[in-house]
Image (spheres, rainbow, N blue to C red):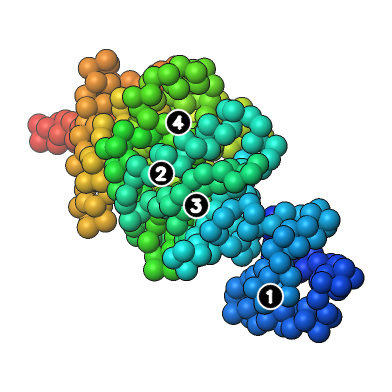
Protein backbone atom coordinates (compact mmCIF):
# COMPACT_ATOMS: atom_id res chain seq x y z
CA UNK A 1 0.00 0.00 0.00
CA UNK A 2 1.44 3.40 -0.97
CA UNK A 3 1.61 6.41 1.34
CA UNK A 4 -1.14 7.97 -0.78
CA UNK A 5 -3.36 4.92 -0.22
CA UNK A 6 -2.71 5.10 3.49
CA UNK A 7 -3.66 8.74 3.58
CA UNK A 8 -6.95 7.88 1.90
CA UNK A 9 -7.81 4.92 4.14
CA UNK A 10 -11.19 5.30 5.83
CA UNK A 11 -12.28 5.45 9.43
CA UNK A 12 -15.90 4.43 9.01
CA UNK A 13 -16.91 6.33 5.89
CA UNK A 14 -14.41 9.17 6.07
CA UNK A 15 -11.47 10.52 8.04
CA UNK A 16 -8.44 8.35 7.23
CA UNK A 17 -5.25 8.63 9.28
CA UNK A 18 -5.78 12.35 9.80
CA UNK A 19 -9.13 11.48 11.39
CA UNK A 20 -7.44 8.85 13.56
CA UNK A 21 -4.96 11.44 14.81
CA UNK A 22 -7.80 13.79 15.74
CA UNK A 23 -9.60 10.91 17.46
CA UNK A 24 -6.49 10.07 19.50
CA UNK A 25 -6.09 13.68 20.60
CA UNK A 26 -9.74 13.74 21.69
CA UNK A 27 -9.30 10.51 23.70
CA UNK A 28 -6.33 11.98 25.57
CA UNK A 29 -8.10 15.32 26.06
CA UNK A 30 -11.12 13.50 27.49
CA UNK A 31 -8.76 11.62 29.85
CA UNK A 32 -10.10 8.26 28.71
CA UNK A 33 -6.58 6.99 27.91
CA UNK A 34 -3.05 8.26 28.28
CA UNK A 35 -0.96 9.55 25.40
CA UNK A 36 1.32 6.51 25.74
CA UNK A 37 -1.66 4.15 25.38
CA UNK A 38 -2.85 6.00 22.29
CA UNK A 39 0.69 5.91 20.83
CA UNK A 40 0.86 2.15 21.47
CA UNK A 41 -2.33 1.63 19.46
CA UNK A 42 -1.09 3.92 16.68
CA UNK A 43 2.13 1.89 16.49
CA UNK A 44 0.03 -1.26 16.05
CA UNK A 45 -2.00 0.56 13.38
CA UNK A 46 1.20 1.42 11.50
CA UNK A 47 2.31 -2.22 11.66
CA UNK A 48 -1.00 -3.30 10.13
CA UNK A 49 -0.67 -0.70 7.40
CA UNK A 50 2.74 -2.08 6.49
CA UNK A 51 1.00 -5.45 6.01
CA UNK A 52 -1.54 -3.85 3.63
CA UNK A 53 -4.27 -3.88 6.26
CA UNK A 54 -6.02 -1.11 8.13
CA UNK A 55 -7.91 -0.78 11.40
CA UNK A 56 -9.39 2.44 12.78
CA UNK A 57 -7.71 3.74 15.92
CA UNK A 58 -11.07 3.63 17.70
CA UNK A 59 -11.28 -0.15 17.14
CA UNK A 60 -7.74 -0.73 18.41
CA UNK A 61 -8.37 1.30 21.58
CA UNK A 62 -11.57 -0.65 22.26
CA UNK A 63 -9.88 -4.00 21.62
CA UNK A 64 -7.03 -3.00 23.93
CA UNK A 65 -9.49 -2.26 26.73
CA UNK A 66 -8.49 1.40 26.97
CA UNK A 67 -11.96 2.73 26.12
CA UNK A 68 -15.39 1.17 25.77
CA UNK A 69 -17.35 0.79 22.55
CA UNK A 70 -19.91 3.32 23.83
CA UNK A 71 -17.17 5.86 24.59
CA UNK A 72 -15.66 5.33 21.13
CA UNK A 73 -19.00 5.90 19.41
CA UNK A 74 -19.65 9.04 21.48
CA UNK A 75 -16.26 10.50 20.55
CA UNK A 76 -16.71 9.58 16.88
CA UNK A 77 -20.07 11.33 16.90
CA UNK A 78 -18.37 14.42 18.38
CA UNK A 79 -15.94 14.29 15.43
CA UNK A 80 -18.82 14.06 12.96
CA UNK A 81 -18.20 10.40 12.15
CA UNK A 82 -20.00 7.10 12.65
CA UNK A 83 -18.63 3.86 14.01
CA UNK A 84 -18.20 1.07 11.49
CA UNK A 85 -19.15 -1.39 14.22
CA UNK A 86 -22.47 0.35 14.69
CA UNK A 87 -23.24 0.63 10.98
CA UNK A 88 -22.52 -2.88 9.70
CA UNK A 89 -22.43 -5.49 12.47
CA UNK A 90 -20.12 -8.39 11.74
CA UNK A 91 -17.90 -6.51 9.30
CA UNK A 92 -14.81 -4.41 9.80
CA UNK A 93 -14.31 -1.70 7.18
CA UNK A 94 -10.70 -1.59 5.95
CA UNK A 95 -10.58 0.94 3.12
CA UNK A 96 -12.52 2.48 0.26
CA UNK A 97 -12.11 0.63 -3.05
CA UNK A 98 -14.05 2.95 -5.31
CA UNK A 99 -17.23 4.83 -5.88
CA UNK A 100 -19.84 5.06 -8.61
CA UNK A 101 -22.86 7.20 -9.37
CA UNK A 102 -25.02 5.38 -6.82
CA UNK A 103 -22.78 3.79 -4.22
CA UNK A 104 -19.38 3.47 -2.60
CA UNK A 105 -17.54 0.16 -2.34
CA UNK A 106 -15.30 -0.74 0.59
CA UNK A 107 -12.91 -3.54 1.38
CA UNK A 108 -13.91 -5.17 4.65
CA UNK A 109 -13.27 -8.19 6.82
CA UNK A 110 -16.15 -10.56 7.56
CA UNK A 111 -15.44 -11.25 11.22
CA UNK A 112 -17.37 -14.54 11.50
CA UNK A 113 -15.33 -16.23 8.75
CA UNK A 114 -12.21 -14.03 8.95
CA UNK A 115 -12.21 -13.35 5.21
CA UNK A 116 -11.90 -10.25 3.03
CA UNK A 117 -15.07 -9.13 1.25
CA UNK A 118 -16.33 -6.09 -0.66
CA UNK A 119 -19.26 -4.06 0.65
CA UNK A 120 -21.32 -1.73 -1.51
CA UNK A 121 -23.10 0.92 0.55
CA UNK A 122 -25.96 3.11 -0.65
CA UNK A 123 -25.37 6.77 0.35
CA UNK A 124 -27.88 8.27 2.75
CA UNK A 125 -29.15 10.73 0.13
CA UNK A 126 -30.40 7.77 -1.92
CA UNK A 127 -31.68 5.82 1.08
CA UNK A 128 -34.70 8.12 1.27
CA UNK A 129 -35.77 7.20 -2.27
CA UNK A 130 -37.90 4.01 -2.49
CA UNK A 131 -36.87 3.62 -6.14
CA UNK A 132 -33.14 3.60 -5.36
CA UNK A 133 -33.55 1.34 -2.33
CA UNK A 134 -35.67 -1.09 -4.36
CA UNK A 135 -33.08 -1.18 -7.15
CA UNK A 136 -30.29 -1.72 -4.61
CA UNK A 137 -32.00 -4.77 -3.09
CA UNK A 138 -32.94 -6.03 -6.52
CA UNK A 139 -29.24 -6.11 -7.39
CA UNK A 140 -28.45 -8.22 -4.33
CA UNK A 141 -31.30 -10.63 -4.99
CA UNK A 142 -30.38 -10.96 -8.67
CA UNK A 143 -26.74 -11.72 -7.83
CA UNK A 144 -27.84 -14.24 -5.18
CA UNK A 145 -29.65 -16.29 -7.87
CA UNK A 146 -26.40 -16.80 -9.76
CA UNK A 147 -23.63 -19.22 -8.91
CA UNK A 148 -20.88 -19.15 -11.51
CA UNK A 149 -17.10 -18.87 -11.33
CA UNK A 150 -17.17 -15.91 -13.73
CA UNK A 151 -19.74 -13.89 -11.77
CA UNK A 152 -18.89 -11.93 -8.60
CA UNK A 153 -20.62 -13.89 -5.84
CA UNK A 154 -23.26 -12.30 -3.59
CA UNK A 155 -22.86 -12.90 0.16
CA UNK A 156 -25.36 -10.75 2.04
CA UNK A 157 -27.68 -7.78 1.71
CA UNK A 158 -29.34 -5.78 4.45
CA UNK A 159 -29.63 -2.54 6.38
CA UNK A 160 -28.05 -1.17 9.53
CA UNK A 161 -29.35 2.14 10.78
CA UNK A 162 -29.75 4.52 7.84
CA UNK A 163 -27.40 2.52 5.62
CA UNK A 164 -28.29 -0.19 3.10
CA UNK A 165 -25.44 -2.54 2.22
CA UNK A 166 -24.64 -5.36 -0.18
CA UNK A 167 -21.77 -7.73 0.70
CA UNK A 168 -20.07 -9.56 -2.16
CA UNK A 169 -16.98 -11.52 -3.08
CA UNK A 170 -13.81 -9.41 -3.04
CA UNK A 171 -11.91 -9.61 -6.33
CA UNK A 172 -8.21 -8.83 -6.06
CA UNK A 173 -7.49 -7.52 -9.54
CA UNK A 174 -8.41 -4.80 -12.03
CA UNK A 175 -11.14 -3.95 -14.52
CA UNK A 176 -10.97 -4.23 -18.31
CA UNK A 177 -11.58 -0.47 -18.34
CA UNK A 178 -8.40 0.10 -16.31
CA UNK A 179 -6.41 -2.14 -18.67
CA UNK A 180 -7.69 -0.30 -21.76
CA UNK A 181 -6.84 3.05 -20.20
CA UNK A 182 -3.21 1.95 -19.80
CA UNK A 183 -2.60 -0.37 -22.75
CA UNK A 184 -4.89 0.96 -25.51
CA UNK A 185 -6.19 -2.44 -26.63
CA UNK A 186 -6.07 -6.22 -26.13
CA UNK A 187 -4.57 -8.79 -28.44
CA UNK A 188 -7.19 -10.91 -30.21
CA UNK A 189 -6.25 -13.96 -28.14
CA UNK A 190 -6.38 -12.02 -24.87
CA UNK A 191 -9.73 -10.44 -25.69
CA UNK A 192 -11.22 -13.76 -26.77
CA UNK A 193 -10.41 -15.38 -23.42
CA UNK A 194 -12.06 -12.54 -21.49
CA UNK A 195 -15.13 -12.44 -23.74
CA UNK A 196 -15.47 -16.23 -23.53
CA UNK A 197 -15.54 -16.06 -19.73
CA UNK A 198 -18.14 -13.29 -19.71
CA UNK A 199 -20.26 -14.92 -22.43
CA UNK A 200 -20.29 -18.08 -20.30
CA UNK A 201 -21.34 -16.01 -17.27
CA UNK A 202 -24.12 -14.36 -19.29
CA UNK A 203 -25.31 -17.72 -20.58
CA UNK A 204 -25.73 -18.80 -16.94
CA UNK A 205 -27.62 -15.59 -16.09
CA UNK A 206 -29.83 -15.93 -19.16
CA UNK A 207 -30.68 -19.51 -18.23
CA UNK A 208 -31.84 -18.15 -14.86
CA UNK A 209 -34.07 -15.64 -16.64
CA UNK A 210 -31.91 -12.57 -15.92
CA UNK A 211 -30.67 -9.90 -18.33
CA UNK A 212 -27.68 -7.88 -17.05
CA UNK A 213 -28.38 -4.72 -19.15
CA UNK A 214 -25.06 -3.02 -18.33
CA UNK A 215 -22.22 -5.14 -19.73
CA UNK A 216 -19.20 -2.88 -20.17
CA UNK A 217 -15.42 -2.80 -19.46
CA UNK A 218 -15.92 -1.25 -16.01
CA UNK A 219 -18.10 -4.20 -14.98
CA UNK A 220 -15.59 -6.87 -15.97
CA UNK A 221 -13.00 -7.72 -13.33
CA UNK A 222 -9.78 -9.64 -14.06
CA UNK A 223 -8.35 -11.61 -11.15
CA UNK A 224 -4.67 -12.10 -10.40
CA UNK A 225 -5.02 -15.59 -11.91
CA UNK A 226 -6.37 -14.14 -15.17
CA UNK A 227 -10.02 -15.13 -14.77
CA UNK A 228 -12.70 -12.64 -15.86
CA UNK A 229 -15.68 -11.98 -13.59
CA UNK A 230 -18.89 -10.14 -14.39
CA UNK A 231 -19.83 -7.60 -11.74
CA UNK A 232 -22.56 -5.10 -10.88
CA UNK A 233 -26.08 -6.47 -11.25
CA UNK A 234 -27.50 -3.01 -10.51
CA UNK A 235 -29.55 -2.88 -13.72
CA UNK A 236 -30.27 -6.61 -13.96
CA UNK A 237 -33.89 -7.46 -14.68
CA UNK A 238 -35.86 -10.67 -14.86
CA UNK A 239 -37.23 -11.19 -18.36
CA UNK A 240 -40.51 -12.35 -16.81
CA UNK A 241 -40.87 -9.23 -14.60
CA UNK A 242 -43.50 -7.46 -16.72
CA UNK A 243 -44.46 -5.07 -13.90
CA UNK A 244 -40.95 -3.64 -13.70
CA UNK A 245 -40.64 -3.65 -17.49
CA UNK A 246 -43.82 -1.59 -17.85
CA UNK A 247 -42.66 0.88 -15.20
CA UNK A 248 -39.41 1.45 -17.13
CA UNK A 249 -41.01 1.65 -20.60
CA UNK A 250 -39.67 4.47 -22.75
CA UNK A 251 -36.58 5.08 -20.59
CA UNK A 252 -33.05 4.16 -21.63
CA UNK A 253 -31.22 2.14 -18.97
CA UNK A 254 -27.57 1.34 -19.68
CA UNK A 255 -24.24 2.98 -20.50
CA UNK A 256 -24.31 5.04 -23.74
CA UNK A 257 -21.06 3.67 -25.22
CA UNK A 258 -22.25 0.05 -24.94
CA UNK A 259 -26.06 0.23 -24.86
CA UNK A 260 -28.20 -1.74 -27.33
CA UNK A 261 -30.62 0.01 -29.72
CA UNK A 262 -33.66 -1.59 -28.07
CA UNK A 263 -32.55 -0.27 -24.66
CA UNK A 264 -32.20 3.21 -26.16
CA UNK A 265 -35.78 2.95 -27.42
CA UNK A 266 -36.88 1.88 -23.93
CA UNK A 267 -38.56 -1.26 -25.21
CA UNK A 268 -40.48 -3.37 -22.73
CA UNK A 269 -39.39 -6.78 -24.06
CA UNK A 270 -35.64 -6.47 -23.46
CA UNK A 271 -34.00 -9.90 -23.60
CA UNK A 272 -30.59 -11.60 -23.69
CA UNK A 273 -29.82 -10.16 -27.13
CA UNK A 274 -29.33 -6.75 -25.48
CA UNK A 275 -26.49 -8.26 -23.43
CA UNK A 276 -25.01 -9.80 -26.58
CA UNK A 277 -24.93 -6.35 -28.21
CA UNK A 278 -23.27 -4.74 -25.17
CA UNK A 279 -20.74 -7.56 -24.93
CA UNK A 280 -20.05 -7.06 -28.64
CA UNK A 281 -19.47 -3.34 -28.06
CA UNK A 282 -17.10 -4.22 -25.21
CA UNK A 283 -15.33 -6.77 -27.46
CA UNK A 284 -15.02 -4.08 -30.17
CA UNK A 285 -13.44 -1.64 -27.69
CA UNK A 286 -11.02 -4.29 -26.44
CA UNK A 287 -9.61 -5.22 -29.88
CA UNK A 288 -9.67 -1.75 -31.52
CA UNK A 289 -8.79 0.47 -28.57
CA UNK A 290 -11.82 2.71 -29.19
CA UNK A 291 -15.53 2.63 -28.49
CA UNK A 292 -17.81 1.68 -31.41
CA UNK A 293 -19.48 5.11 -31.47
CA UNK A 294 -18.38 8.38 -29.91
CA UNK A 295 -19.87 11.83 -29.63
CA UNK A 296 -19.90 15.08 -27.64
CA UNK A 297 -22.67 13.89 -25.30
CA UNK A 298 -24.61 10.71 -24.38
CA UNK A 299 -27.53 11.58 -26.68
CA UNK A 300 -25.22 11.94 -29.70
CA UNK A 301 -23.58 8.59 -28.92
CA UNK A 302 -26.91 6.80 -28.59
CA UNK A 303 -28.17 8.27 -31.87
CA UNK A 304 -25.12 6.80 -33.59
CA UNK A 305 -25.93 3.38 -32.14
CA UNK A 306 -29.33 3.73 -33.81
CA UNK A 307 -28.39 5.27 -37.15
CA UNK A 308 -24.72 5.09 -38.06
CA UNK A 309 -23.01 2.12 -39.72
CA UNK A 310 -20.42 0.32 -37.64
CA UNK A 311 -16.87 0.66 -38.87
CA UNK A 312 -15.77 -3.00 -39.17
CA UNK A 313 -13.28 -3.74 -36.38
CA UNK A 314 -10.74 -5.26 -38.77
CA UNK A 315 -10.61 -1.91 -40.60
CA UNK A 316 -9.25 -0.36 -37.38
CA UNK A 317 -7.11 -3.34 -36.42
CA UNK A 318 -5.81 -5.13 -39.56
CA UNK A 319 -4.26 -7.84 -37.37
CA UNK A 320 -7.75 -9.01 -36.39
CA UNK A 321 -8.89 -12.28 -37.97
CA UNK A 322 -11.88 -12.26 -40.32
CA UNK A 323 -13.72 -14.68 -38.03
CA UNK A 324 -13.30 -12.46 -34.97
CA UNK A 325 -14.49 -9.40 -36.91
CA UNK A 326 -17.53 -11.31 -38.16
CA UNK A 327 -18.50 -12.35 -34.64
CA UNK A 328 -18.35 -8.75 -33.40
CA UNK A 329 -20.42 -7.44 -36.31
CA UNK A 330 -23.11 -10.07 -35.75
CA UNK A 331 -23.14 -9.30 -32.00
CA UNK A 332 -23.63 -5.61 -32.79
CA UNK A 333 -26.29 -5.88 -35.47
CA UNK A 334 -28.75 -2.99 -35.13
CA UNK A 335 -31.74 -5.33 -35.37
CA UNK A 336 -31.73 -7.96 -32.64
CA UNK A 337 -33.15 -10.58 -35.01
CA UNK A 338 -29.89 -10.22 -36.98
CA UNK A 339 -27.75 -11.03 -33.92
CA UNK A 340 -26.97 -14.39 -32.34
CA UNK A 341 -30.25 -15.98 -31.34
CA UNK A 342 -28.75 -17.66 -28.29
CA UNK A 343 -25.77 -17.08 -26.03
CA UNK A 344 -24.78 -20.71 -26.60
CA UNK A 345 -24.44 -20.06 -30.36
CA UNK A 346 -22.15 -17.14 -29.54
CA UNK A 347 -20.05 -19.33 -27.26
CA UNK A 348 -19.65 -21.96 -30.00
CA UNK A 349 -18.38 -19.34 -32.46
CA UNK A 350 -16.01 -17.79 -29.92
CA UNK A 351 -14.49 -21.20 -29.16
CA UNK A 352 -14.20 -21.98 -32.87
CA UNK A 353 -12.27 -18.78 -33.64
CA UNK A 354 -10.08 -19.28 -30.57
CA UNK A 355 -9.21 -22.73 -31.92
CA UNK A 356 -8.48 -21.43 -35.44
CA UNK A 357 -11.78 -22.50 -37.04
CA UNK A 358 -14.38 -20.29 -38.80
CA UNK A 359 -17.44 -19.07 -36.84
CA UNK A 360 -20.23 -21.32 -38.12
CA UNK A 361 -23.23 -19.36 -36.79
CA UNK A 362 -21.87 -15.96 -37.85
CA UNK A 363 -21.19 -17.24 -41.37
CA UNK A 364 -24.70 -18.69 -41.57
CA UNK A 365 -26.22 -15.32 -40.59
CA UNK A 366 -24.06 -13.54 -43.18
CA UNK A 367 -25.17 -16.03 -45.86
CA UNK A 368 -28.87 -15.49 -45.04
CA UNK A 369 -28.48 -11.71 -45.14
CA UNK A 370 -26.54 -11.89 -48.41
CA UNK A 371 -29.22 -14.08 -50.00
CA UNK A 372 -31.99 -11.75 -48.83
CA UNK A 373 -30.20 -8.72 -50.27
CA UNK A 374 -29.48 -10.46 -53.58
CA UNK A 375 -33.15 -11.46 -53.86
CA UNK A 376 -34.01 -7.77 -53.43
CA UNK A 377 -31.78 -6.76 -56.33
CA UNK A 378 -28.27 -7.22 -55.02
CA UNK A 379 -27.94 -3.62 -53.86
CA UNK A 380 -27.64 -2.38 -50.30
CA UNK A 381 -29.39 0.98 -50.13
CA UNK A 382 -27.87 3.75 -48.02
CA UNK A 383 -31.41 4.49 -46.84
CA UNK A 384 -31.86 1.06 -45.28
CA UNK A 385 -31.16 0.54 -41.58
CA UNK A 386 -27.54 -0.55 -41.19
CA UNK A 387 -26.49 -3.72 -39.48
CA UNK A 388 -23.04 -5.12 -38.90
CA UNK A 389 -23.78 -7.88 -41.41
CA UNK A 390 -24.97 -5.47 -44.12
CA UNK A 391 -21.77 -3.45 -43.70
CA UNK A 392 -19.64 -6.47 -44.56
CA UNK A 393 -22.16 -7.53 -47.22
CA UNK A 394 -21.78 -4.17 -48.96
CA UNK A 395 -18.03 -4.68 -49.05
CA UNK A 396 -18.50 -8.19 -50.47
CA UNK A 397 -20.87 -6.96 -53.19
CA UNK A 398 -18.51 -4.10 -54.06
CA UNK A 399 -15.62 -6.56 -54.46
CA UNK A 400 -17.83 -8.79 -56.64
CA UNK A 401 -18.66 -5.86 -58.93
CA UNK A 402 -14.97 -4.95 -59.34
CA UNK A 403 -14.14 -8.56 -60.19
CA UNK A 404 -16.96 -8.65 -62.76
CA UNK A 405 -15.67 -5.51 -64.50
CA UNK A 406 -12.15 -6.94 -64.68
CA UNK A 407 -13.46 -10.20 -66.19
CA UNK A 408 -15.48 -8.28 -68.78
CA UNK A 409 -12.43 -6.22 -69.80
CA UNK A 410 -10.31 -9.36 -70.15
CA UNK A 411 -13.01 -11.01 -72.25
CA UNK A 412 -13.25 -7.99 -74.53
CA UNK A 413 -9.46 -7.92 -75.01
CA UNK A 414 -9.49 -11.64 -75.80
CA UNK A 415 -12.12 -11.09 -78.50
CA UNK A 416 -10.07 -8.27 -80.05
CA UNK A 417 -6.95 -10.46 -80.14
CA UNK A 418 -8.87 -13.29 -81.84
CA UNK A 419 -10.28 -10.91 -84.49
CA UNK A 420 -6.80 -9.56 -85.18
CA UNK A 421 -5.44 -13.09 -85.63
CA UNK A 422 -8.25 -14.00 -88.08
CA UNK A 423 -7.69 -10.86 -90.16
CA UNK A 424 -3.92 -11.47 -90.25
CA UNK A 425 -4.46 -15.12 -91.30
CA UNK A 426 -6.79 -14.15 -94.18
CA UNK A 427 -4.02 -12.07 -95.74
Whether tag 2 and tag 1 are in contact, CB under 8 A, the answer is no
Q: Quadrant of residue 142?
A: top left
Residue annotated with mark 4? 260
Whether tag 3 and tag 4 are in contact, CB under 8 A, the answer is no
Residue 198's spot in the image, x, y percent?
36, 49
Whether tag 4 and tag 1 are in contact, CB under 8 A, the answer is no
Distance between the Cα atoms at labels 3 and 1?
29 Å
Q: Earlier in the sequence, mark 4 or mark 2?
A: 2
Q: Quadrant of residue 27?
A: bottom right
Q: Earlier in the sequence, mark 4 or mark 1?
A: 1
Distance between the Cα atoms at labels 4 and 1?
57 Å
Q: Earlier in the sequence, mark 2 or mark 3?
A: 2
Q: Residue at point 15% right, 34% down?
A: 418
Q: Nearer the viewer, residue 175 or 395?
A: 175
Left/right placement of residue 285 relative to residue 341 reads right
Residue annotated with mark 3? 167
Nearer the viewer's eye, disc 4 or disc 1? 1
Residue 411's spot in the image, x, y percent?
20, 32
The label shown at residue 65 is 1
Inspect this view and state whether residue 390 appears.
Answer: no
Q: Residues within 10 Å of mark 3 (few under 14, many from 20)?
A: many
Distance between the Cα atoms at labels 4 and 2?
22 Å
Image quadrant for the N terminus? bottom right
> 90 above or below 427?
below
The label shown at residue 143 is 2
Residue 208's spot in the image, x, y percent?
29, 37
Distance between the Cα atoms at labels 3 and 4?
29 Å
Q: Earlier in the sequence, mark 3 or mark 1?
A: 1
Left/right placement of residue 33 relative to residue 403 reads right
Amino acid sequence: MSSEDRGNSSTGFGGGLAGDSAFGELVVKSKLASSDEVKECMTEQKRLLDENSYRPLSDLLVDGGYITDTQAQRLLTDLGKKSTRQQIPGYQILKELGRGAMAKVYQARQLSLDRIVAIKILPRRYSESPEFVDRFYREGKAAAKLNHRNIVQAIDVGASGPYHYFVMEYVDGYTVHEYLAKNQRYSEAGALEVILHIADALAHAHEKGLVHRDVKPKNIMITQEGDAKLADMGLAREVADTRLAQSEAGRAYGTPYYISPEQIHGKVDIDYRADIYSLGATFYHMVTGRVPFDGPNPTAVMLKHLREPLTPPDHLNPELSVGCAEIIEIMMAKKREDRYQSTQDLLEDLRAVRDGRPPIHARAIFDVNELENLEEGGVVSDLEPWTGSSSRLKNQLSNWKVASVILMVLLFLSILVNIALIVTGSH
